[in-house]
Image (cartoon, grey):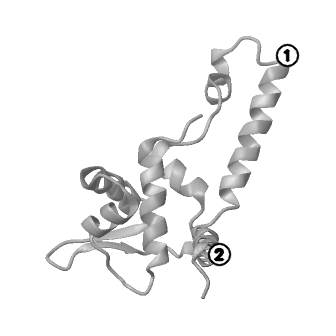
Amino acid sequence: MRLTRAGEYAIRCLLYLSMHRDRPVIGRKEIAEAMDIPAQFLGKVAQQLARAGIIAIRQGAQGGYELVARPEDITLLSVVETIDGEIFLNDCIHRPGSCDRQGFCSVHLVWERARKQLRDTLAGTTLARLVEEESQGCAKRSPGP
């Protein structure tokens, strides 16, 4: 399973909005430039995030994107699955009837375990945690006096 470009861009957009919570609305162009996202692509991703109730899109001269969900409540799993759909590592997990070996295949159990571990890791990672780690990482990388 590979994270799609849309999923990656959604995470970048939400991370930027989470890092700038002091500003209620941030323009699409600013986010696109800061997070290296094509502006047109960002617009499409933002529509999906808005439909999911994670952000609001504000129109007009002072328009842009507003984070409406709390960063503490937004997990990487919810973002990825909002954009890409439910995570499956193999067709036999996604469509059980597609494989005649499912009842006795030892690899099937490995796919199930790996899927659960991936989902648990993503579900346990919130945007708030990533913002905290970003700020600590930036402080560690900045040159001292």
| Relative image position of residue 29 (x, y in whole percent) | 25, 65
Q: CA distance from mark 1 to mark 2?
A: 50 Å
Determine the residue positioned at 46% across, 60% down: 12
**Looking at the rendered structure, which numbered label has been put on residue 104?**
1
Which quarter of the rendering shows the N terminus?
top right
Residue occupying the far top of the picture: 100
Which quarter of the rendering shows the C terminus?
bottom right
Sequence-wise, which precedes: disc 1 or disc 2? 1
**Looking at the rendered structure, which numbered label has been put on residue 92?**
none
Determine the residue positioned at 43% across, 87% down: 22
Residue occupying the far front of the picture: 145
Count neighbours of disc 1 (C-alpha within 10 A) and say few if under 14, some if 14 to 19, many if 20 or more: few
Q: Secondary structure at mark 2?
A: helix
Determine the residue positioned at 81% across, 29% down: 110
For badge 2, the amino acid type reads: Lys
**Looking at the rendered structure, which numbered label has been put on residue 140?**
2
Could you tell whether 135 is left or right of 57 in the image? Answer: right
For badge 1, the amino acid type reads: Phe
Count neighbours of disc 2 (C-alpha within 10 A) and say few if under 14, some if 14 to 19, many if 20 or more: few
Q: Secondary structure at mark 1?
A: loop
| Relative image position of residue 66 (x, y in whole percent) | 36, 75
| Relative image position of residue 11 (x, y in whole percent) | 49, 58
